[in-house]
Amino acid sequence: MDDLNLLNPERVLLSVMLDDDGWRGISPEEALSLCEWEDQAIVAGAAHGLQNHGLIQIEERENEYYYLEAEGEKAIVEGLLELRLWNWMNEQSPPTMANLQLYHEKYEVGPGLGLLKKLGVTIEGGVLKWEGTEKIREEIKLREWFLQTLQSVANSEYDNNQSNPEEAFDPDRWSDMVEHFSTRKNFIRKVVRTERTYTLDEKAIDLDRSSLHVVNLVTDITPELLQSDAWKEAEFRAFDVTLDASTPRTGRSHPMQALIERIRSVFLEMGFSELVDDYVQSAGWNMDALFIPQDHPAREMQDTFYLDEPATLPLPNDLMDTWKAIHEHGGETGSSGWGGSFSNETAQRPLLRTHTTVNTIQYLAQHPHDACRVFSVDRVFRKEAIDRTHLPEFHQIEGIIMEDGANLQMLVTTLKTFYAKMGLPEVRVRPAYFPYTEPSLEIEVKWRGKWLELGGAGIFRPEVTEPLGISSPVLAWGMGLERLAMLVLGLDDIRQLYISDLEWLRQQPIL
């Protein structure tokens, strides 16, 4: 016994298993009760310790349990849809489609007929007909019994190895019911659980049971212990220093944060300064300043998050007058504008910014004569439905150069330099259209033999820069950070970036 060097919880568990005929096996729940413990973690730790000593065996098995969900519980109260329609049909002479639609809700008729057709009910000349009444009745009764069986155990565990509380059931029919209701939305939910059984091993026969008493087991030698006489009666736990120790897992940056820091370092290395600003902006700076027409689809509520509070973000009248002239007839830029009428109320509507350019253009307006190179990597918001390639909240990467002599060749060279430093040396551009740049370009990089579009670029139009007093050319480009992250990490679902899957995170490369 001394050679085994058992911990106190291991001694207690082994003792109760020997006293309680542990050869037949006990569950962790039974062990918790027998040992009079309150924490299952103690049971699990003691069991694994005894398993390592070869004193018990741990058997694991997976069981399927089924629970009623909302529609299943509703069917218990109101009756299954096919049962209610079936009962109605048997009371009619004859049951016609016209009467069916008259006496039942429209939203139930279609699905109900679909269920009944699968049972053999047909429609001939507007009359519902069927053969094999007993067979249909038996199938519906079986479905009803299945749901009632789940309810009879009060939504607790019930698997296909247990007996029906009222009568034995055919396992094949049970499987048929599980398959059927699994195809019906919100009827049943399956939960797979791993269950364990602890069984004594033959090695436990030779144990001296009198030595299974709880002792003062010392794992740390402290000054307090040595200063007292307690060490004389204590039992010291031995440690095998020759065993391999597990490598501790250290913290690391999330792949998205690591990618952001890498992008920042590239921009800073290229002589850019970072720009950070507020999420909440006016539609004027977000859209109007960038020569995006006020009837553009991107301004609709289904695409942009507008705010109720504050109700408005006031803008200087002279600034709105300038935008009004630009939008309606081009002002003094030589442009013909967009025509129509410009609304100051629309310009002052508050929203969550849809791109970081809203902050860049304000920075340029505040420093219209100072050459600059700025960038931002920050959040933007668009009213997108969440799927494998879209999120309503994401990050945008943006770079801006304003200086005398800036031209398209400088823009293309800067793009190629940036992406080369990001590990994407093959870059090409092709013509595109954006409301606030001319010329406009789409940026493509070669990844695993394919050209992939990663963002847009261009030179700000005079309608954007001249009203703000900017006389130098402004080069701009931007892209979505998540799209780049999916590319670098080899993902096909953008949602993976925001799921706290620790195992996946540990496997990601250091960027």
Image (cartoon, helix red, strand yellow):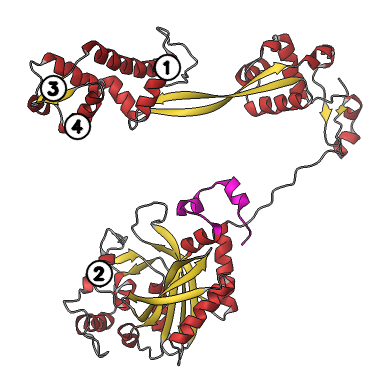
- Tell me which amino acid carries mark 3: Leu
Indicate the quadrant containing the C terminus: top left, top right, bottom left or bottom right.
bottom right
**CB atoms of marks 1 and 2 within 8 Å:** no
In the image, is residue 245 above or below residue 313?
A: above
Pinpoint residue 446: horizontal percent, then vertical percent. Answer: 51, 68
Q: Which callout, 4 or 3, points at the residue further toward the start of the chain?
A: 4
* Disc 4, SS: helix
How far is mark 3 from mark 1, CA to CA? 30 Å
**Mark 1, residue position:** 172
Which stretch is magenta?
A: 489-511
Q: Quadrant of residue 366?
A: bottom left
Marks 4 & 2, CB-CB < 8 Å contact: no
Looking at this view, is 431 or 251 the one in front?
431
User: Which residue is denoted by mark 3 in the rendering?
Assistant: 128
Q: Residue at x 41, y 88 (%)?
A: 473
Q: Residue at x 17, y 29 (%)?
A: 109
The image quadrant of residue 134 is top left
The reply to whether residue 276 is in sight is no
Residue 263 sits in which quadrant? bottom right
Q: In this rendering, which labeled residue sits more in front, label 1 or label 4? A: 1
Q: Helix, strand, or loop for circle 1? A: helix
Residue 441 appears left or right of 260: left
Say which amino acid is labelled 4. Answer: Gly
